[in-house]
Image: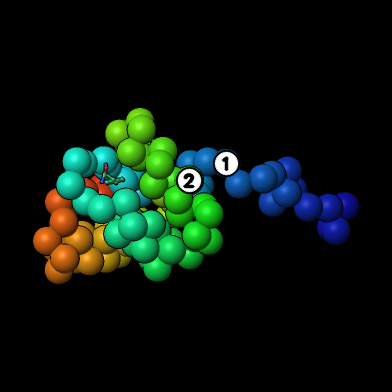
């Protein structure tokens, strides 16, 4: 049957065939102003004001939250952008990434 797709061709991509994804984590601290964190989330993670407040409060209460899941390259860029904005304003805000 020449038109038949082989089982291999139609098989959904298994997890091991996809590039690994990375969680970007925001960490709580006692000094970074809440408004600054909300601004960072709106600006760098394209969140609405309401979403940004929700995530910021989750970090504030629980110590850490996932702010997004990205390819390695995009996650690295996001972490660097957060750290640079925080450094420029002299806030101790910390952002890290971890393999999903
Ligand atoms: N805990 C900070 C405060 O009370 C607010 C804060 C939220 C800081 C989230 C960092 O990732 C953070 N001002």
**Whether residue 21 can be seen here:** no
Residue 96 locus on image (x, y percent): 26, 47
Give the residue at x 34% y 62%: 40
Near-viewer residue (84 or 48): 48
Say whether residue 93 is left or right of residue 24: left
Q: Which class describes the residues within 10 Å of circle 1: few (<14), some (14-19), or many (20+)?
A: few
User: Residue 25: which quarter of the image?
Assistant: top left
| 43 up-or-down from 95: above or below | below
Near-viewer residue (6 or 62): 62
Residue 81 locus on image (x, y percent): 26, 65
User: Of discs 2 and 1, which sits in the foreground?
Assistant: 2
Give the residue at x 35% y 39%: 59
Q: Which residue is mark 1?
A: 14
Quarter of the C terminus within the rendering: top left
Q: Does dot 2 land on a helix, a strand or a loop?
A: helix
Say whether residue 28 is left or right of residue 39: left
| 10 up-or-down from 49: above or below | above
Q: Which residue is mark 2?
A: 54
User: Residue 41: which quarter of the image?
Assistant: bottom left
| Sequence-first tag of 2 and 1 | 1
Q: Under 8 Å from ligand 1: the CB of mark 1?
A: no
Say whether residue 6 is left or right of residue 22: right
Give the residue at x 87% y 52%: 1
Asked if marks 2 and 1 touch (Cβ < 8 Å), the reply is no
| 74 up-or-down from 5: above or below | below
Give the residue at x 83% y 53%: 4
**Whether residue 96 can be seen here:** yes
Q: Does dot 1 land on a helix, a strand or a loop?
A: loop
Q: Which mark is residue 34?
A: none
Residue 29 locus on image (x, y percent): 21, 41
């Amino acid at each position: 049957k020449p038109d038949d797709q082989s089982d291999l061709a139609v098989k959904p991509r298994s997890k091991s065939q996809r590039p690994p994804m990375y969680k970007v984590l925001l960490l709580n601290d006692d000094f970074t102003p809440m408004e600054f964190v909300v601004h960072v989330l709106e600006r760098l993670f394209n969140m609405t004001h309401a979403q940004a407040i929700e995530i910021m409060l989750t970090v504030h209460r629980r110590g850490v939250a996932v702010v997004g899941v990205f390819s390695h390259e995009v996650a690295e860029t996001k972490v660097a952008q957060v750290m640079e904005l925080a450094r420029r304003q002299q806030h101790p805000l910390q952002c890290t990434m971890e393999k999903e």
